[in-house]
Amino acid sequence: MLELSDIKSSEEELQNYYAQLSAQYVTPAWISGGISTEPQSKAVPYLWHWRDLRPQAMRAAELVGTQQAERRVLRLTNPELSGVSASNTLVANIQIVMPGEIARAHRHSAAALRLIIEGRGGYTVVNGERVPMFPGDLVLTPNWTWHDHANDTDGPMMWLDGLDTPLVRMLEAGFYEEYHQERQEFGAGVNASPWHYPMSEMHAALERLADAGFSAARDGIVLEYTNYHVVEGAGYSMVGDRRLDWEDKDVFTVPTWTFHEHVNTGDRAAFLFSFSDAPVMKALTLYREEVRA
Ligand SMILES: [Fe+2]
């Protein structure tokens, strides 16, 4: 007959055994813990106000040149994570390029996106294609694409960077390379469509959907780490039991497996932009959603 076994050993015997294992760099799983019935993120919901971020970005532009910093970037740091990232797997940065400056060309295995916050007409060169940047535009630099940024306007260019650097680091798949010149030559092709999603087009498309009665955000409750950026509008989000009040250009982060809802308290449409781990989760068949009744 098969049954669960019951062995009585003394605490001393166990501790001796564990000490031997430890000396051999082996760990008994039964005392390691770590089983939970659902994900429990160390990250907490958090919101960074643009009114706080903008002056610090301008200050960075006074203190540090693009010669000194590969990228002049302020990294939004989740208060409860040990790493320098907004969520466990994603970073959210504010980057600033001042008039006349360039951020030199490089590429990396982490994928990046930019959501333009301020400045009109600076540009990013992606694999030799010149992509113009206007507020609300989304510019993609997928992994291992060459990219450099330039500001030939008379005002600062600022944007939100989103990268999957922590995830790539966790997978120990981080590669990085500098281009052989500071800037890429670019061809005649302006408005390279694979890399560029202009806000003017998104705006119109979203308003059409809203008019047609679609809820823009089914954005139910998703097993993912998410960072949100308020393109425009005012309102608040309940994330778990925390209320995050947002307005134009703020950034906030939603930990994995946390109920969240967004409420527009303003008198105009609110446009929220989010990026998340959903594509990775789906590729690994780990993606789950739950809608609260
Ligand atoms: Fe980069």
Image (cartoon, rainbow, N blue to C red):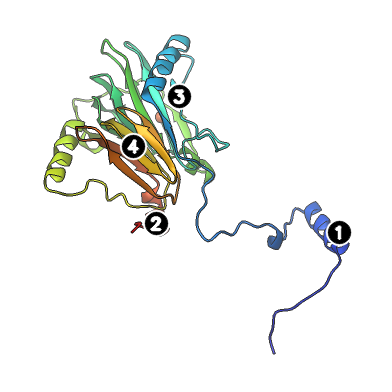
The residue positioned 81% from the left and 52% from the top of the image is 23
Tell me which numbered mark, 4 or 2, is placed earlier along the sequence.
4
The answer for how far apart the CA atoms under marks 3 and 1 are is 49 Å
Q: In the image, what residue type sits under mark 3? A: Leu
The residue to which callout 1 is attached is 16
> Within 8 Å: ligand 1 and the Cβ of disc 4?
no
In this rendered view, identify the residue nearer to me: 164 or 239. 239
**SS state under label 3:** strand
In this rendered view, identify the residue nearer to me: 119 or 81. 81
Q: In the image, what residue type sits under mark 4? A: Tyr
> Within 8 Å: ligand 1 and the Cβ of disc 3?
no
The residue positioned 14% from the left and 36% from the top of the image is 204
Ligand 1 image position (quadrant): top left
Q: In the image, what residue type sits under mark 1? A: Asn
Q: Indicate the quadrant containing the C terminus: top left, top right, bottom left or bottom right.
A: bottom left
Front disc: 3 or 4: 4
The residue to which callout 4 is attached is 236
The residue to which callout 3 is attached is 74
The answer for how far apart the CA atoms under marks 1 and 4 are is 55 Å
